[in-house]
Amino acid sequence: MNWSEFFYMGGYAFYVWTAWGITAFALCWLFLQAKLSNAKIKSEIIRQIAREAILSENNADSN
Amino acid sequence: MNILSSIWKAVSRGFHRLGSPREFYTISNYLTPVFGALFLVLSLIGSYYALFVAPADYQQGDSYRILFVHVPSAWLSLFIYVVMASAAAIGLVWRMKMAFVVAICSAPIGAAFTSLALATGSLWGAPIWGTWWEWDARLTSELILLFLYFGVMALYYAFEERRTAERAMAVLAVVGVVIVPIIHFSVEWWSSLHQGATVFREGGPAMPPSMLTPLIYMALGFTFFYGYILFLRARNMVLSNERKSKWVRALLQPQTLQPQGLPSKILQAESGKEGTQ
């Protein structure tokens, strides 16, 4: 079997490749979205910890 | 009997450990990459056999290769709903924090697979049935499933208070589970364009091994993918929900974890000092 025949899919190329393509796209999207929101949540919490560290430091200075 | 009771004790201890967000975070740290790796291996092998090795169908030619993404998506759209509804029920009955997390994190994944099942089915129907969409029992009930997933998500995000949101979402998820048998049996109860069950049916699968094997690989691979994404999302939600707890703070202390040197920069900028020696 050669490659052009393979991509031709017996004339159903558009339907088969679109179906496989949107599936691959959706799985990648689910993965990336989970990874991005992980980075976002972690940096939010780290910022919060840093902010509170400064506040307690300033309080210690003024006392 | 002693062995049985000790097994039961071990299982219930494991269940209780997973029920605590902190323990879940620790255990899932090891399980998550395993699920991801299993997904990759199974779906790559499955794709290879589905696209290169399996023969063309004698009636539908190569168009039937959509089956290898359509059936696993459809299977997961139902499987995820059952997991979500069970988790929601456990959360409602035993007030388990992690059960609600599993339920709400499953909803968007389920919605994604339901959309995929509908879209790939439409792409298959266009050349074979001659129509992209028909208001037939199987297609319509699957569309209702998609709206149920959206409803569960919308209900959760509609409430400010998390406890209320969790309970409201869980009630809808549990009530909506009636759609699952309706979808499964829709092709038997009503006359439908959609074909009947070919894998889970009386008398075994009506499919040659050359087609059935890659399908099983794909279905298993997709199921592990669901587990993988569920763990990733649940870990995010646990971090977010428990952000005030000591263990999350210890985990993300600037001394132990410094992504992009963020904390020290913020420290300098926000304190307005020259340095923090």
Image (tube, rainbow, N blue to C red):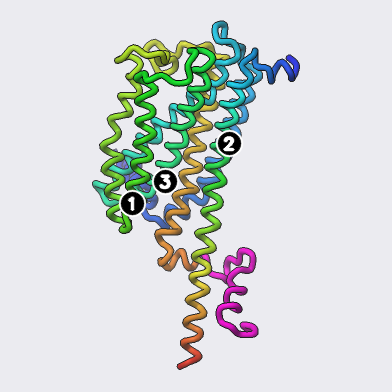
When asked about the image quadrant of residue B3, the answer is top left
Residue placed most toward the observer, B203 or B271: B271
Tell me the crowding category of disc 2: few under 14, some 14 to 19, or many 20 or more residues within 10 angstroms, Cα based: few
The vertical placement of B90 against B69, above or below, is: below
Answer whether residue B70 is visible to the viewer in this image.
yes
Which residue corresponds to the image point at 62% horizontal and 21% vertical from the top-left?
Answer: A14
Q: Amino acid at mark 3?
A: Cys
Task: Please report, as a chain letter, where disc 1 is located.
Answer: B
Write the start and end of the magenta stretch as one range: B251-277
B97 vs B51, left or right, is: left
Q: Which residue is tagged 3?
A: B105
Q: Give the alpha-carbon distance from disc 2 to disc 1, as whole Å.
A: 29 Å
Which residue corresponds to the image point at 60% horizontal and 30% vertical from the top-left?
Answer: A21
Residue placed most toward the observer, B18 or A52: A52
Q: Which residue is tagged 1?
A: B158
- Dot 1 or dot 3, earlier in sequence: 3
| Residue B8, numbered circle | none
Task: Please report, as a chain letter, where disc 3 is located.
Answer: B
Please check the rendered image and state whether residue B256 is part of the magenta-colored stretch, yes or no: yes
Q: Which residue is tagged 2?
A: A25
Image location of residue A50, percent across then percent down: 52, 73
Of the two numbered discs 1 and 3 in the rendering, the one whose residue sits closer to the viewer: 1
The vertical placement of B15 against B66, above or below, is: below
**Residue occupying the far bottom of the picture:** A63
The vertical placement of B244 against B132, above or below, is: below
A46 vs A2, left or right, is: left
Image location of residue B71, percent across then percent down: 48, 23
Label 2's element? helix
Of the two numbered discs 2 and 1 in the rendering, the one whose residue sits closer to the viewer: 1
